[in-house]
Image: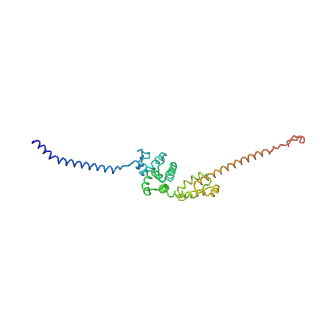
Amino acid sequence: MDNTRGSGQEGGNDNPQMTELRNMVQMLVGAVTAQQQLLQQHFQPPQPQETRELDLSRGETQQGETSEYRGVTEDPIIPMESVAVVRQFLKLKPPTFKGGMDPVKANDWILAMEKNFRLLRCGEQQKVEIGSYLLAGEASRWWNLKGVREPGMDWARFKVIFREKFVPRAVQNAKCSEFEHLKQMGTTIADYEGSFTNLAEYAPHLVATDEMRARRFEDGLRHEIKRVIRPLVLPTYAEVLDRAIIVEQDEIERKKYFDSKRRQNFGAEGTSGQKKQKPEMKSRNFGNNPKGQVQ
């Protein structure tokens, strides 16, 4: 009995303290666990696959692949709908632009980008996203400051601010003046169109609409071609260019035809003249010329 009471008394004295201690420990563990969960949610937010945007500035793709252009620029985050286009674009091995005051390199980069844009049928916003992604070095740092100030800009605006930064103003003015006075002269339509397209980049205000571009191109054509096209009042640049090529080709074919006829006529006249001419034969009259001299 004594042992039983002693044992019961000892257990009764310990239970309240142990229970309180266990409760405090459980509360502490629960608080720490909750804090850890909050920290994880803060630093690692959930990113559902269907809405997550990939940060291609680190070369990240949907499959976790790494692009060869990793580290090209710290900007931008490419929307999911543009990721497929960007990946196709990178397969074309497009050039990067690192900056510097070199108008030839700057313009060549723009032309190379636009060539690929046409191939992949990129939208205006996609052009800006891809173009800014391929900026590196000084050019990338410039975009990180400039791009955020004009969200939603289109490619035409991108080219304007790009040239303001990397093509000296004196060069832009000279190219603009050259465009204003551009004439076809003795070149082909293809050569004239190439010069027209390149120089028009420096004078966007002169070709702000497709009709303005058509009239400007038409004004620079040779007189022989322009006099055929101008009465047609073609509304688009593509139509003017197409008709100019046709007129030029007709002109070339006509010239070939008349040159061929001229050569044929010249050859016929030469043959006829040779047939009419007879060699002069001096008669020999030995009877009247006793000495036998040839008269």
Which residue is at the front of the view, 226 or 196? 226
When asked about the image quadrant of residue 150, the answer is bottom left
Q: Residue furthest left?
A: 2
Which residue is at the front of the view, 43 or 293? 43
Horizontal and vertical percent for residue 222? 63, 55
Horizontal and vertical percent for residue 27? 24, 49
Task: Quarter of the image for the N terminus: give it.
Answer: top left
Which residue is at the front of the view, 98 or 117? 117
Task: Count every numbered label the image shows and give the total.
Answer: 0
Task: Quarter of the image for the C terminus: give it.
Answer: top right
Q: Residue furthest bottom?
A: 205
When asked about the image quadrant of residue 207, the answer is bottom right
Horizontal and vertical percent for residue 157? 48, 56
Residue 284 against residue 233 in the figure, above or below: above
Q: Residue furthest front?
A: 1
Q: How is the image coloured?
A: rainbow
Which residue is at the front of the view, 12 or 128? 12
Horizontal and vertical percent for residue 23? 21, 48
